[in-house]
Amino acid sequence: MDSAPGPVPTLDDIRRAHEALGEAIMRTPFLPAPKLSELTGATIRVKYENQQTTNSFKDRGALNKLLSLTEDERRRGVIALSAGNHAQSVAYHARRLGIPATIVMPETTPFVKVGNTRSHGATVELAGDTLVEAEAAMKELMARHDLVLVHPFDDFHVIAGQGTVALEMLAEDDDLDALVVPIGGGGLMSGVAIAAKALKPEIELVGVEVRSYSAMWGLMHGQAVEIGGNTLAEGIAVKDVGRLTRAIISKHVSDIVRVDEEHVERAVNAYLTLQKTMAEGAGAAGLAALLAEPERFAGRKVGLILCGGNIDPRILASIMMRELARENRIVTLRLATPDRPGVLGTIAGLIGRSGGNILDVSHHRLYLELPAKGASVEITFEVRDAAHGDEIVAALQAAGFAVRRLSAIGGAMQA
């Protein structure tokens, strides 16, 4: 293991951070989650960091860093590079403290995060398509205006602030077997690891990365990994992890679970439908690990951190529909029909009488594979479960329709 580049926070540093943050940071609920426990086979408690003022744990580290600044540094102002939650936290708490803040964000940052950051009073600069491209603009602005950098993860005070999450969790329940924590740059995992291992040395710490951005996993396992692509968990889509965070995680974290996009989607949906709370992709990554490897955590008492809830409502709606399709509660069919009046009504009536709820209908006549007097109908409807969907397909076939079942998730399959 490499020696740590610079001082590493201790439990005392994290305790001092907790005291300094005071009432400016919410002591978020840490509650049992029986429905998630039933879903995964583990006994789960969830720390709801999505209830912080800017709806993410980032408030803790950003504020602790800002509180550490000298009067001269406060006067000069701060700058941060972030695709979302860190940006909002720096902007909000800088305004509270009267510190000028400039936030550099990639042009691809979700609108909701850009808008929220601006609403907190920061100057927002959009630059480049990626964090790497935006970083060049950030460095130029920082040098030109002599601004103080508030790093999103690789910073002593930021890590100490994030570690206060674990202080609160173990103060409420010191019987936990494991903490499963998302890793982007590693600031949250580092702070949590320092505090948790100091308070309970036997506790297991497991990190989580999405497979397309598993830089820390690659470093821990000495393997080259391809980094890049679109992910629902953009909050942990980091190509370069911190040097300080890498040293801390290498020392304290037993393993990192890599999850696929489907696991992240399922976790976001489970938080919404079972826990009635909003989780962004990165915020749900801990639960995604339990869905990806349930046997690893079965029967164990696991603490999860729902670390952020800033998700685009349009994306959330899409996730819910996709999950209904995975559960076979939404069915899409393509029917070859004669092109004559009343056929569409016959189909709709049959589905309705069978208890299906039609969501969408698309009627086509111009496909060359169709007869000149034929048509094609694509119809999407809601059913109670897979068996109910099969019953409706059978009823349509019994009525003489050629039915092809389409998958809303990927490709078509013959009914």
Image: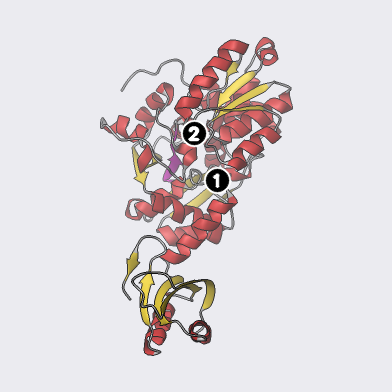
In this view, the residue in front, 290 or 116, is: 116
Q: Earlier in the sequence, mark 1 or mark 2?
A: 1
Q: Is residue 32 visible?
A: no
Residue positioned most to the bottom = 399
* Above or below, 240 relative to 233: above
Q: Quadrant of residue 75?
A: top right
Tell me the residue that label 2 is attached to. 188
Q: Position of residue 10 (x, y in %)?
A: 49, 23
At label 1, the amino acid type is Lys
Q: Position of residue 282 (x, y in %)?
A: 48, 43
Q: Is residue 179 magenta?
A: yes
Q: Going by the image, does 206 lie left or right of 117?
A: left
**Which numbered circle lies on residue 47?**
1
Secondary structure, mark 1, is: strand
**Quarter the C terminus occupies:** bottom left
In this view, the residue in front, 61 or 42, is: 61
Q: Going by the image, does 215 lie left or right of 110?
A: left
